[in-house]
Image (cartoon, rainbow, N blue to C red):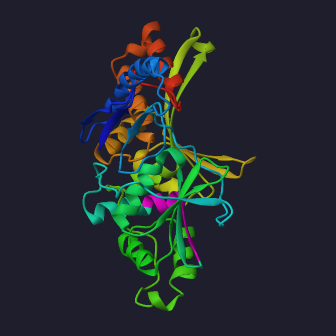
Amino acid sequence: KYISFITLPCAGKTSLSFKYSNLPYFLILKINVIVNNLKVIVTKLKQRSQSAGNFVYLIYKRTSETLSNEPTKIFFHPTAKPSPITFSPTTVEKVSPSHPPQVCMGACVTDNDFGYYLAGLIDGDGHFSKTPQIVIVFNFLDASLAYYIKSRIGFGNIYKVKHKKAVILVISKLAGIKKVLNLINGKIRSQIKIDQINNNILIHSYFKEYDPFSSSAAGLDNHWISGFSDADASFQIKLISRKDRDNKTEVRLNFQIDQKKIDLLLLMKKYFGGNIGYRKTQDTYYYGSTSFGSAKKVIEYFDKFHLLSSKHVNYLKWKKAYTIIQKKEHLNALGIEKILKIKNSLNRLNDNNVG
């Protein structure tokens, strides 16, 4: 993993690079401030240069692929769940990494750990079709996570979905599908995904060695919730003015997951506490950990089983708001102002720091 700056201000060639390893996301965001300052300097150098071949670009690597030809910022996005995607050659274009993936995301060291994470990710945003093939959807800013999943599995292609802020990992080779089945067997929980596996995949003779899949009976003290949350969760901060309390501001920290079916949300409620609601207009269920007791359990979990997507940034901010509340700083105007600043920075592409 590295960040490098390459400039050709005149005829000569100058390059500067520095390596980093296992940096937490908030440090990467801090680096962005430095990057922006350097960008100003580089822009001035470009203006002074008359060479037609001059160019400046920044490469940011989380795996080994270049996510963009000329990004000017390092940023993350809270991976809002993409709308359903119909996969066809006319709606996607293949994306190839410029170098082989060579990063460990800092979690899921063993195949067993990774299997739980992958099962959760698929339970949230995966699909098994009769082709047969497996498709997993990612927010386009989590392309590096898609490449990490691909590198761990050893199979698949990644495509950018046209007109949508999404990329998909498609695994079509039978050996690749078999690798995924071996990783998630006994770990998958969604009945919809289990039915897809049994009815769309295991009907093929290549997979005749497998018994029908059934819902995992394993506990949740593993990476499954991390994968499921990277697919479907969000971290929210709500500030409510209470007229019955002299207009004092009430702070609510909410870890939320939306689903069409209630079964997986019941697991979340049992594990973290919290509540489940139903939106009639959208025909969806949602889980929310609105109490501070539930928030504490959420933090204890994600500090142990890390998120691997860009949602990790929002989690760190959300956790910081919790720390402010624990110190009772939210009881004064300055503390509320700090929390409001954190709230407003959630889900923003251009946020540069954790606070």
Vertical side of 28 occupied by 137: above or below: below
Residue in view at x 47 percent, y 83 percent: 212
Tell me residue 175's x, y (percent). 41, 80
Residue 122 forms part of the magenta stretch: yes
Residue visible at 46% across and 89% down? 206
- Nearest to the observer: residue 41 or residue 258: 41
Tell me which secondary structure the magenta stretch mostly adopts.
helix
Query: Number of marks in the image?
Result: 0
* Location of residue 320 in the rendering, given as x and y in whole percent from the top left corner: 37, 26
In the rendered image, residue 289, in percent from the top left (x then y), is placed at 48, 39
Q: Quadrant of residue 94?
A: bottom right
Left or right of 232 in this view: 328: left
Span highlighted in magenta in the image: 120-129
The N terminus lies in which quarter of the figure? top left
- Can residue 277 be seen in this snapshot? yes
Q: Which residue is at the far right?
A: 281
